[in-house]
Amino acid sequence: MSGGVDSAVAAALLAERGFDVIGVTMKMYSPTRPAHAKSCCGAEDFDDARRAANALGIPHYVLDFEEVFRRSVIRRFASDYGRGRTPNPCVTCNNDVKLGALRRFAERMGARYVATGHYARLSHEADGAHLFAGDPLKDQSYALAQATPAQLDALLLPLGDLTKEETRAHAVRLGLAVAEKAESQDICFVEGGDYREVLAREGAATGRPGDVVTSSGARVGAHRGLAHFTVGQRRELPATTFNDGPRYVTRLDAETNTIVIGREEELYAGGLVADEANVLRPERFADGPLEAFAMTRYRAPLNRARAQFDRASGELRLEFRTPERAVAPGQLVALYDQRGEVLAGATIREAR
């Protein structure tokens, strides 16, 4: 229970269905600045979670997960940026903390399930759990695409069939004080909106200057560190004039500490290679490549793709039906079928 309306209503709906519910708030990061409306992890959020649990008549615990969060999420975040990648820390947090460390605590408590306030649908069938997209305006199935089958088997998503407005209506019905509370949108450990402060604090290699070159290899300037850039970025590039339009970051080369820039059309990739593949429906890949819909960033439009999973290497390879803009290594790619079921998730290694 984060202190927001989603987790509070998730707990309430489970209690109404007859589950024995235990509220848990995870202390994963200690803010060093006053919280603002769209941040989380502040003392006020902990108080809101406690008050919601009291209103629902369920026990409430605050658990210190700062060490596992720093080790699993923050350090990987800093390491990925230092390698010229664009990480997605919320995916790592779901896998390693909420459905990892918290799940282990639940087992010690004798709990069969962990439940969260994610907006995604989960169907528990004889052949295992099936994960589906939720409300299009709020769907969060992308962030769960690397949850393992075992994690999904032990997960409940009570808000899967609801919209945000319906969730708030339930909160009003239940008399919860968080019914109209603004939702957090920032990365919890990036205070002030500048992730580079986190990188500096973690000692990531962010400030080593290097060359900025065109796709043909011509040097056009210098950069102050790979971690300040991501694929598709236009700002903070050298003030260079081109007669055929603006330039964007098309690639970050960590080995040479070089940023490659190109025209808008050079941002588009015909495919990608991803590793750390989590295949939720392996039977769908059994007969070779399949047609699916790919999401390469959170809330990005789905793009038709031909997908092939190499079991030996653990790689997922995609060929897009329509070239995809700004494919960024380090981001998650999630695959869906026509019904909105998540087939697989993997970490993008390179665009092709």
Image (cartoon, rainbow, N blue to C red):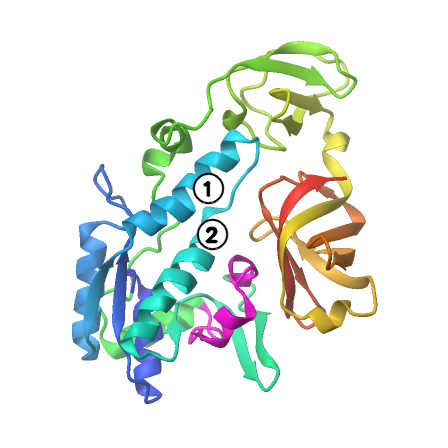
* Local secondary structure at mark 1: helix
Of 319 and 286, the residue lying toward us: 286
Identify the residue at the far bottom of this view: 18
Of 255 and 43, the residue lying toward us: 255
Residue 36, percent across and down?
26, 44
Which span is picked out in magenta? 139-163
Residue that appears at 39% across and 42% down: 74
Q: Is residue 175 above or below residue 208?
A: below
Q: Which of disc 2 and disc 1 is earlier in sequence?
A: 1
Q: Pick the quarter of the image with the N terminus.
A: bottom left
* Local secondary structure at mark 2: helix
Relative to 199, is 248 on the left or the right? Answer: right
Count residues near mark 1 (Cα–Cα under 10 Å), then give few for <14, some for 14-19, many for 20+.
some
Q: The residue under label 1 is which amino acid type?
A: Arg
Residue that appears at 63% across and 22% down: 259
> Is any atom of residue 47 visible in this view?
yes
> Is any atom of residue 240 visible in this view?
no
Count residues near mark 2 (Cα–Cα under 10 Å), then give few for <14, some for 14-19, many for 20+.
many
Question: Which labelled disc corresponds to residue 162?
Answer: none
Q: The residue under label 2 is which amino acid type?
A: Thr
Q: Is residue 128 above or below residue 131?
A: below
Disc 2: which residue: 92
Q: Pick the quarter of the image with the C terminus.
A: top right
Q: Is residue 12 above or below residue 7?
A: below
Residue that appears at 38% across and 45% down: 71
Q: Is residue 68 above or below residue 221?
A: below
CA separation in Å, label 1 and label 2 = 9 Å
Disc 1: which residue: 76
Relative to 352, is 100 on the left or the right? Answer: left
Q: Quadrant of residue 86?
A: top right
The answer to whether the residues at label 1 and label 2 have Cβ atoms under 8 Å apart is yes
Asked if the stretch drawn in magenta spans residue 189, the answer is: no
